[in-house]
Amino acid sequence: MPRLIVLPHADLCPDGAVIDNAETGKNICEVLLEHDIEIEHACELSCACTTCHCIVREGFDSLNDADELEEDMLDKAWGLEAQSRLSCQAVIGEEDLVVEIPRYTINHAREHH
């Protein structure tokens, strides 16, 4: 199984994380949640928001292609980059991944607690 490396995030994963058993065929969001990294997912993994936005620093080309709906949603994400994906739609392939969770999301309810 591929390795999923999560870069440090001040709130969700201060020391970063290495997930050695990221299951091929699952999406990044599912794997993060299964390993107690509480990434935002306000729409419950239905590709209806951008709160699970992540940046795939390594292994981007091993993921499934983004469909038109995901591309449209990504246009609304804070801090969009060329290697941005919605983690609920990014299906893990055979290669190791390095993922960065952006500091901010558009989920104002959580950010203003």
Image: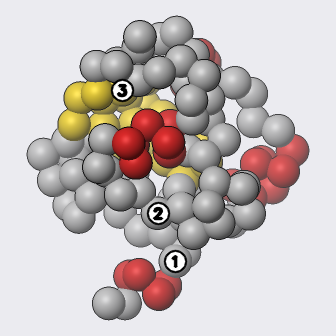
Q: Is residue 19 visible?
A: yes
Q: Residues within 10 Å of mark 1 (few under 14, many from 20)?
A: some
Element carrying mark 3: strand
Closest to the observer, 47 or 84: 47
> How far apart, in angstroms, are the residues tagged by discs 2 and 1?
8 Å
Element carrying mark 1: loop
Asked whether the beta carbons under mark 3 and mark 1 sit within 8 Å of each other, the answer is no
Q: State which quadrant residue 34 falls in.
A: top left
- At x 35%, y 57%, the residue is 38
Give the image location of residue 78, x and y in percent: 54, 65
Q: Residues within 10 Å of mark 2 (few under 14, many from 20)?
A: many
**Viewport quadrant of the C terminus:** bottom left
Asked whether the beta carbons under mark 2 and mark 1 sit within 8 Å of each other, the answer is yes
Residue type at numbered disc 2? Glu
- At x 43%, y 31%, the residue is 57
- At x 72%, y 55%, the residue is 47
- At x 53%, y 18%, the residue is 24
- Direction from residue 26 to residue 98 in the image, left or right: left
Residue 40: assigned label: 2
